[in-house]
């Protein structure tokens, strides 16, 4: 323990202290006056007191030096604080930059591929529909035969032998045809007979060629072709009506194909009666329409016994048809 006199002596030896050490020293002095002995560890080390005193003197010297140079303490404090403020601002800015989400460049989205859409179906007109139907029927109808089916006449053979070649114009051909028609009326009977014989031979050869062409197709193909030709004829008539034409074209491809392999449909009793009466001379010189009316009235006037003969003919023809179909 230190005595009171010792304490005063130490306090006198201690150099001037910094302001923050004065309260502690005052407390020690009051304790010593009260007669309380204090341990030595309660006193601040001498080295610390000296260091603090030195620091205080250094600061005072620096302040006096700046004042002598014409710089005020307030300006110095402000100048010292400004960099701090700037640093703080920089830190805040940095913090703000860090806090802000990074702007990432978004890649431009690839344009969506538009689904391929077919062209909207255009409303077809009646004329276009008819044209497509005609094209389809022409394919089913088979091409025309290499030779026509009709028989040749003596005049046809005479014209064919005396007609000039294909080099002549249409006008010249028409003039030549007119001359041949006049000459044909003046041919001798012997020459006429000669051309009759030629026409028969050529008709027979043409029929053989036509038959060979028909049999190169199956009966089913011929049946489909005949159905298509019948429809084609009606469609061509509709096309002509839409176009405003009065004349209906009848090309060769609309004529039915004659196939001997196909079974002929059976005739009715009325057809047998009509064919028989039509060949008689009773209706010579009468037009077909009134003639048909007269024959129809006769058929209605017949008794059942008189009709029986024609009914038997129709029954036999029906049996014939069934036999041919079954083969």
Image (cartoon, grey):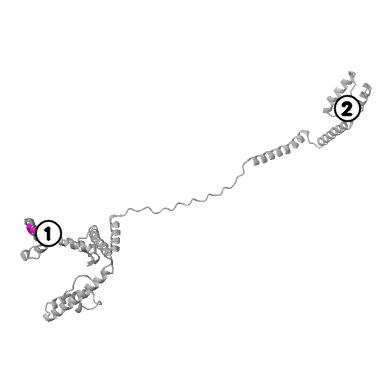
Residue at horizontal 86 percent and vertical 33 percent from the top = 51
* The C terminus, quarter of image: bottom left
Question: Where is residue 280 shown, x and y percent of the image?
Answer: 7, 65
Towards the viewer: 187 or 136 = 136
In terms of secondary structure, where does tag 2 sit? helix
| Residue that mark 2 sits on | 41
| Residue that mark 1 sits on | 311
- Asked where in the image residue 259 lies, by quadrant, the reply is bottom left
Residue 84 horizontal side relative to residue 303, left or right: right
Question: Where is residue 65 shown, x and y percent of the image?
Answer: 83, 36
Towards the viewer: 127 or 148 = 148
Q: From this viewpoint, is residue 188 visible?
A: no
Disc 2 crowd, CA 10 A, few/some/many (<14, 14-19, 20+) = few
Magenta region, mostly helix, strand or loop? helix
Question: Where is residue 207 shown, x and y percent of the image?
Answer: 21, 72
- Asked where in the image residue 7 lies, by quadrant, the reply is top right
Residue 187 horizontal side relative to residue 77, left or right: left
Tell me which segment is drawn in magenta.
305-314
Q: Is residue 280 above or below residue 175?
A: above
Q: From this viewpoint, is residue 77 visible?
A: yes
Tell me which numbered mark, 2 or 1, is placed earlier along the sequence: 2
Please say whether residue 327 is one of the residues in the magenta stretch: no
Towards the viewer: 206 or 53 = 206
In terms of secondary structure, where does tag 1 sit? helix
């Amino acid at each position: 323990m230190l005595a009171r006199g010792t304490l005063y002596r130490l306090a006198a030896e201690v150099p001037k202290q910094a302001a923050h050490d004065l309260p502690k020293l005052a407390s020690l002095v009051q304790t010593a006056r009260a007669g309380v002995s204090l341990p030595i560890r309660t006193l601040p080390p001498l080295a610390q007191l000296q260091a603090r005193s030195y620091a205080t003197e250094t600061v005072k010297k620096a302040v006096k030096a700046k004042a002598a140079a014409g710089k005020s303490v307030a300006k110095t404090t402000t100048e010292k604080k400004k960099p701090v403020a700037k640093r703080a601002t920089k830190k805040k800015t940095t913090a703000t930059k860090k806090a802000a989400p990074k702007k990432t460049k978004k890649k431009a989205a690839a344009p969506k591929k538009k689904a391929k859409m077919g062209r909207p179906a255009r409303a077809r007109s009646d004329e276009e529909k008819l044209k497509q139907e005609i094209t389809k029927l022409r394919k089913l109808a088979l091409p025309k035969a290499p030779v026509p089916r009709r028989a040749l006449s003596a005049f046809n053979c005479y014209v064919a032998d005396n007609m000039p070649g294909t080099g002549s114009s249409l006008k010249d051909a028409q003039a030549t045809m007119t001359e041949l028609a006049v000459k044909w009326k003046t041919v001798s009977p012997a020459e006429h007979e000669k051309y009759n014989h030629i026409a028969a031979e050529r008709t027979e050869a043409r029929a053989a060629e036509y038959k060979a062409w028909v049999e190169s197709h199956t009966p089913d193909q011929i049946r489909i072709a005949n159905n298509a030709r019948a429809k084609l004829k009606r469609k061509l008539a509709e096309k002509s009506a839409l176009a405003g034409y009065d004349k209906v074209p009848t090309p060769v491809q609309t004529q039915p194909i004659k196939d001997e392999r196909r079974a002929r449909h059976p005739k009715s009793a009325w057809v047998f009666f009509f064919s028989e009466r039509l060949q008689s001379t009773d209706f010579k010189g009468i037009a077909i329409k009134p003639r048909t009316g007269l024959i129809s009235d006769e058929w209605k006037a017949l008794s059942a016994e008189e009709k029986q003969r024609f009914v038997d003919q129709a029954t036999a023809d029906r049996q014939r048809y069934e036999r041919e179909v079954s083969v």
